[in-house]
Image: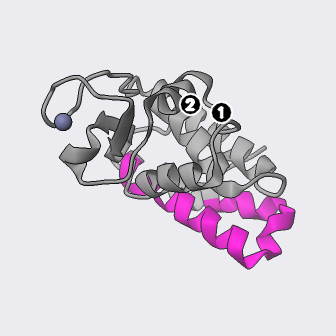
Protein backbone atom coordinates (compact mmCIF):
# COMPACT_ATOMS: atom_id res chain seq x y z
CA UNK A 1 0.00 0.00 0.00
CA UNK A 2 1.50 3.29 -1.09
CA UNK A 3 -0.09 6.65 -0.31
CA UNK A 4 2.41 8.92 -1.97
CA UNK A 5 1.36 11.75 -4.20
CA UNK A 6 4.03 13.83 -5.91
CA UNK A 7 4.26 17.52 -5.20
CA UNK A 8 1.94 17.46 -2.21
CA UNK A 9 4.46 16.83 0.49
CA UNK A 10 2.74 15.88 3.69
CA UNK A 11 -0.70 16.98 2.57
CA UNK A 12 -3.22 14.58 3.90
CA UNK A 13 -6.24 14.77 1.66
CA UNK A 14 -4.48 14.30 -1.68
CA UNK A 15 -2.74 11.30 -0.22
CA UNK A 16 -6.00 9.86 0.98
CA UNK A 17 -7.65 10.57 -2.34
CA UNK A 18 -5.00 8.36 -3.85
CA UNK A 19 -6.83 5.52 -2.17
CA UNK A 20 -9.23 5.86 -5.08
CA UNK A 21 -6.54 4.51 -7.37
CA UNK A 22 -6.87 1.18 -5.65
CA UNK A 23 -10.27 0.75 -7.24
CA UNK A 24 -12.72 -0.04 -4.48
CA UNK A 25 -16.02 -1.34 -5.88
CA UNK A 26 -18.05 1.36 -4.10
CA UNK A 27 -16.33 4.09 -6.13
CA UNK A 28 -19.10 3.57 -8.68
CA UNK A 29 -21.86 3.88 -6.10
CA UNK A 30 -22.77 7.57 -5.99
CA UNK A 31 -24.23 7.48 -2.51
CA UNK A 32 -21.34 5.56 -0.99
CA UNK A 33 -18.85 7.79 -2.76
CA UNK A 34 -20.56 10.92 -1.46
CA UNK A 35 -20.51 9.53 2.10
CA UNK A 36 -16.84 8.73 1.64
CA UNK A 37 -16.01 12.26 0.55
CA UNK A 38 -17.98 13.72 3.44
CA UNK A 39 -16.01 11.50 5.78
CA UNK A 40 -12.50 12.18 4.52
CA UNK A 41 -13.22 15.90 4.26
CA UNK A 42 -13.34 15.99 8.07
CA UNK A 43 -9.73 14.89 8.34
CA UNK A 44 -8.20 17.88 6.61
CA UNK A 45 -9.09 20.62 9.13
CA UNK A 46 -8.41 18.17 11.92
CA UNK A 47 -4.90 17.33 10.77
CA UNK A 48 -3.89 20.47 8.92
CA UNK A 49 -1.45 21.63 11.60
CA UNK A 50 0.16 18.25 12.06
CA UNK A 51 3.79 18.16 11.01
CA UNK A 52 3.52 14.59 10.00
CA UNK A 53 0.43 12.44 9.67
CA UNK A 54 0.74 9.37 11.81
CA UNK A 55 0.11 5.98 10.33
CA UNK A 56 -2.86 5.48 12.56
CA UNK A 57 -4.97 7.78 10.37
CA UNK A 58 -4.08 6.04 7.13
CA UNK A 59 -4.72 2.65 8.64
CA UNK A 60 -8.04 3.86 9.99
CA UNK A 61 -9.13 5.09 6.57
CA UNK A 62 -7.85 2.10 4.70
CA UNK A 63 -9.70 -0.16 7.07
CA UNK A 64 -12.86 1.89 6.56
CA UNK A 65 -12.47 1.85 2.78
CA UNK A 66 -12.20 -1.91 2.75
CA UNK A 67 -15.44 -2.28 4.70
CA UNK A 68 -17.33 0.53 2.93
CA UNK A 69 -19.02 -1.80 0.48
CA UNK A 70 -20.07 -4.45 2.95
CA UNK A 71 -21.46 -2.39 5.82
CA UNK A 72 -23.53 0.72 6.34
CA UNK A 73 -20.95 3.49 5.82
CA UNK A 74 -22.51 5.59 8.58
CA UNK A 75 -21.77 2.82 11.05
CA UNK A 76 -18.22 2.62 9.76
CA UNK A 77 -17.85 6.39 10.22
CA UNK A 78 -19.05 6.18 13.82
CA UNK A 79 -16.83 3.20 14.60
CA UNK A 80 -13.82 4.82 12.96
CA UNK A 81 -14.41 8.07 14.78
CA UNK A 82 -14.61 6.52 18.23
CA UNK A 83 -11.28 4.81 17.48
CA UNK A 84 -9.84 8.16 16.49
CA UNK A 85 -11.05 9.71 19.74
CA UNK A 86 -9.53 6.84 21.68
CA UNK A 87 -6.24 7.20 19.84
CA UNK A 88 -6.17 10.90 20.63
CA UNK A 89 -7.17 10.30 24.25
CA UNK A 90 -10.39 12.26 23.82
CA UNK A 91 -13.17 9.85 24.76
CA UNK A 92 -15.33 11.64 27.32
CA UNK A 93 -16.62 8.69 29.28
CA UNK A 94 -18.08 11.15 31.71
CA UNK A 95 -21.11 10.84 33.98
CA UNK A 96 -21.31 14.62 34.25
CA UNK A 97 -22.83 17.05 31.83
CA UNK A 98 -20.24 19.12 30.04
CA UNK A 99 -22.45 22.21 30.16
CA UNK A 100 -23.73 22.35 33.73
CA UNK A 101 -21.31 19.85 35.32
CA UNK A 102 -24.02 18.02 37.26
CA UNK A 103 -24.58 14.24 36.89
CA UNK A 104 -26.30 13.04 33.74
CA UNK A 105 -29.41 10.87 33.79
CA UNK A 106 -30.39 7.74 31.93
CA UNK A 107 -30.49 9.60 28.64
CA UNK A 108 -27.75 11.84 27.32
CA UNK A 109 -27.20 14.11 24.39
CA UNK A 110 -23.84 14.44 22.75
CA UNK A 111 -21.92 17.53 21.76
CA UNK A 112 -19.26 17.72 19.10
CA UNK A 113 -16.48 15.18 19.84
CA UNK A 114 -19.17 12.97 21.42
CA UNK A 115 -19.06 14.82 24.73
CA UNK A 116 -22.00 13.90 27.00
CA UNK A 117 -24.46 16.51 28.19
CA UNK A 118 -28.04 16.70 29.45
CA UNK A 119 -30.64 16.68 26.67
CA UNK A 120 -32.11 19.76 28.43
CA UNK A 121 -28.77 21.54 28.32
CA UNK A 122 -28.30 20.89 24.62
CA UNK A 123 -31.96 21.13 23.61
CA UNK A 124 -31.32 18.02 21.61
CA UNK A 125 -32.19 14.44 20.89
CA UNK A 126 -30.91 11.92 23.37
CA UNK A 127 -29.72 8.34 23.52
CA UNK A 128 -29.77 5.89 26.41
CA UNK A 129 -26.60 6.51 28.40
CA UNK A 130 -25.86 2.80 28.67
CA UNK A 131 -25.84 2.42 24.91
CA UNK A 132 -23.55 5.39 24.39
CA UNK A 133 -21.06 4.20 26.97
CA UNK A 134 -21.20 0.67 25.59
CA UNK A 135 -20.35 2.13 22.21
CA UNK A 136 -17.43 4.02 23.79
CA UNK A 137 -16.19 0.74 25.27
CA UNK A 138 -16.75 -1.70 22.43
CA UNK A 139 -16.24 0.72 19.50
CA UNK A 140 -19.05 -1.23 17.80
CA UNK A 141 -22.44 -0.01 16.63
CA UNK A 142 -23.99 -3.45 16.30
CA UNK A 143 -26.34 -2.96 19.26
CA UNK A 144 -27.42 0.51 18.10
CA UNK A 145 -30.55 1.07 16.03
CA UNK A 146 -30.23 2.78 12.67
CA UNK A 147 -31.76 6.01 13.98
CA UNK A 148 -29.28 6.00 16.87
CA UNK A 149 -26.43 5.56 14.41
CA UNK A 150 -27.91 8.39 12.36
CA UNK A 151 -27.79 10.61 15.44
CA UNK A 152 -24.15 9.76 16.19
CA UNK A 153 -23.25 10.20 12.54
CA UNK A 154 -24.77 13.68 12.59
CA UNK A 155 -22.58 14.62 15.54
CA UNK A 156 -19.46 13.29 13.84
CA UNK A 157 -20.26 15.30 10.73
CA UNK A 158 -20.10 18.48 12.78
CA UNK A 159 -16.35 17.97 12.84
CA UNK A 160 -13.71 15.97 14.62
ZN1 LIG B 1 -26.40 19.80 31.96
Q: Secondary structure at mark 2?
A: helix
Residue 79: % across, % down: 61, 39
Residue marked by disc 1: 140
For residue 89, side relative to residue 10 (left or right): left
The secondary element bearing badge 1 is classed as loop
Q: Please report the residue visible at 33 percent of the width from the left and 36 percent of the height from the top.
A: 115
Q: Position of residue 56 (x, y in %)?
A: 58, 32
Residue 144, quarter of the rendered image: top right
State the quadrant of the N terminus: top right
139 relative to 2, above or below: above
Is 99 displayed left or right of 157 in the figure? Answer: left
Is residue 8 something one can see in this rendering? Answer: no
Q: Which mark is residue 135?
A: 2
Q: Earlier in the sequence, mark 2 or mark 1?
A: 2
* Horizontal and vertical percent position of residue 156: 45, 51
Q: Main secondary structure of the magenta part?
A: helix
Q: As drawn, which residue projects farthest toward the front?
A: 106
Q: Which residues are magenta?
A: 17-46
Left or right of residue 159: residue 138:
right
Q: Is residue 14 magenta?
A: no
Above or below — where is 136 with respect to 71? Answer: above
Mark 2 and mark 1: span between their CA atoms? 6 Å
The residue located at (37%, 28%) in the rendering is: 90
Coloring basis for residues: one colour
The answer to whether 21 is drawn above or below residue 106 in the figure is below
Disc number placed over residue 105 in the picture, else none? none
Quick check: marks 2 and 1 in contact, CB under 8 Å? yes
Amino acid sequence: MDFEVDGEDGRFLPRIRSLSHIGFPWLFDRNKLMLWHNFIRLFEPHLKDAEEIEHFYFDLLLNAAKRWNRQNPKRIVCESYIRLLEYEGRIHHDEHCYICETPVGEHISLMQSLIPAHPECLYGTSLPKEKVFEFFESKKTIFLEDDEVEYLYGIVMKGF
